[in-house]
Amino acid sequence: MTGMLDMDFIDFMDISTLTHVVPPLATTLAALPALPIAGINWHSVLFLLFAGLACGFAVGVVAADNVVRMALYLVFSLGATAGLFFLAGAEFIGAMQLMIYVGGTLVLLVFGVMLTAQAPLVSIKPSSSDRTLTAVAGASLLSLLLTAAFSVDAWRGPGVGVVPAPSATPLGMALVGVRVDEPPAGTPVGGRVGYMLPFEIVSVHLLVVLVGAAYLARAKRRRTPRPIDALASAMPVEPVTPVATVAPVATVAPTGRSAGGAKSALVGGGR
Amino acid sequence: MMGLVLATAMVSLDACLATVPLLAVNPFTEPVGVVHYLIVGAVLFTAGIACMTLKRNALGILMGIELVLNGANINFVAFASPYLRADGAPTLGLDGQVVALFVILLAAAEAAVALAITLNFYNNHATVDVDRADDLKG
């Protein structure tokens, strides 16, 4: 396709007159089909670019010890993955990857990193034995997955380049329960339903999860009461209460609760 | 364990030797297929698993989970794409893209809850080192 474009371009420009005007440009244009650029499949080039970025930054996430760098590498890796989605013809998924993942989830993670990035916690280095064990396990897992990927012949053939139809409209219709896309080969007739129920479940799930996250992360009262509160709660409400009823409370309570309370007061004492 | 690793390595070497015609072509001129996407997905999945097992920072473990989910998503999208198949007939069709969309949404939900738990742990223990989370140890 590129070669045909070049020939059209040269014919259109009338290369004989061009030679008189700008000889260097004309010679460059004439020499263009001789370059190896003529047969290049730009889809493959872009795929190699995005695949290299995604894989390289994913390995960088593993290799980095600094948690801030890990977050940055993860942003790049997931962004390159969105490029891979675009190249596979799933433009809506690629856009959602950029908007939800890179724009939402990773911002959440970066906020977590910023909230917890005190000096000793920024880089917690794993031990070298852990590194060795992880390398062995990762290499064996990767070889297993690659073996499985290469084992099916139908997956190996180069793509014929059937440009898929835009998938945003069929996706939206499928999410409200109407299928307008072509069924893949081998689909049983009449067995296709939409995704309305999973869509509703996921919606309610997201709502519940966000309410739960807000509940979990809210600013709450101190777990360990301040000394003045402890003193107030330890004082008997009625002054006529005999000592014998207060004493079991005082002996039972420290066994479970105050041990953890003392520990957390030691660990997080400055707060 | 080492025997298992060696056996797996030998099997994968066989697979690589069987695919020499695939590796011998010029990658810049040959159209990509499903297996190229599967390779990228396998690398991201493995990196995520390694991240989850290696990191001691709780946020690093969360990033490993994100990588694993993305590796799975790449496979779903690759199986859904007619562009990558020699016969033009995808295995999954649009269903793969729908599942990928659900995976993205559930990953967002999981990240929100896990981050809230991590912040709670940090507020109570003043650390995000998961090796220090041993209060329930007998």
Image (cartoon, helix red, strand yellow):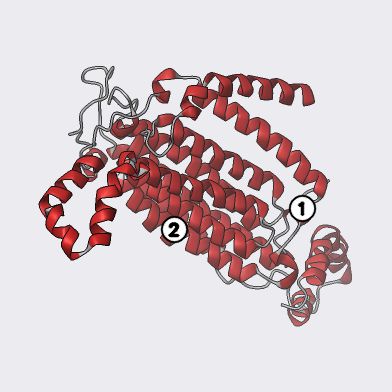
Residue at the (75%, 80%) spot, across then down: A232
Residue at horizontal 47 percent and vertical 58 percent from the top: A105
| Front in this rendered view, residue A198 or B74 | B74
Q: Please name the amino acid that badge 1 sits on.
A: Pro
Residue tagged 1: A126
Instruction: Sort mark 2 into few (<14), some (14-19) or many (20+) by Cα contacts within 10 Å.
Output: some
Which element carries disc 2, helix, strand or loop? Answer: helix
User: Image quadrant of residue A270?
Assistant: bottom right
Mark count: 2
- Looking at the picture, tell me which residue is in the foreground, B91 or A143: A143
| Amino acid under disc 2 | Val
Q: Chain of mark 2?
A: A
- Residue B109 horizontal/vertical position (percent): 47, 52
Question: In x, y percent, where is residue A65?
Answer: 69, 58
Image quarter of the N terminus of chain B: top right
User: Residue A102, labelled with which disc?
Assistant: 2
* Residues at discs 1 and 2 in contact (Cβ within 8 Å): no
Location of residue A27 with respect to B96 vertically, above or below? below
Mark 1 surroundings within 10 Å by alpha-carbon count, few (fewer than 14), some (14 through 19), many (20 or more): some
**Residue A241 position in % (x across, y down):** 81, 73
Q: Is residue A225 left or right of residue B92?
A: right
Q: Is residue B119 visible?
A: no
CA gap, disc 1 and disc 2? 27 Å
Q: Could you tell me which residue is drawn at 43 percent across and 34 percent down? A: B26
Say which element carries label 1: loop
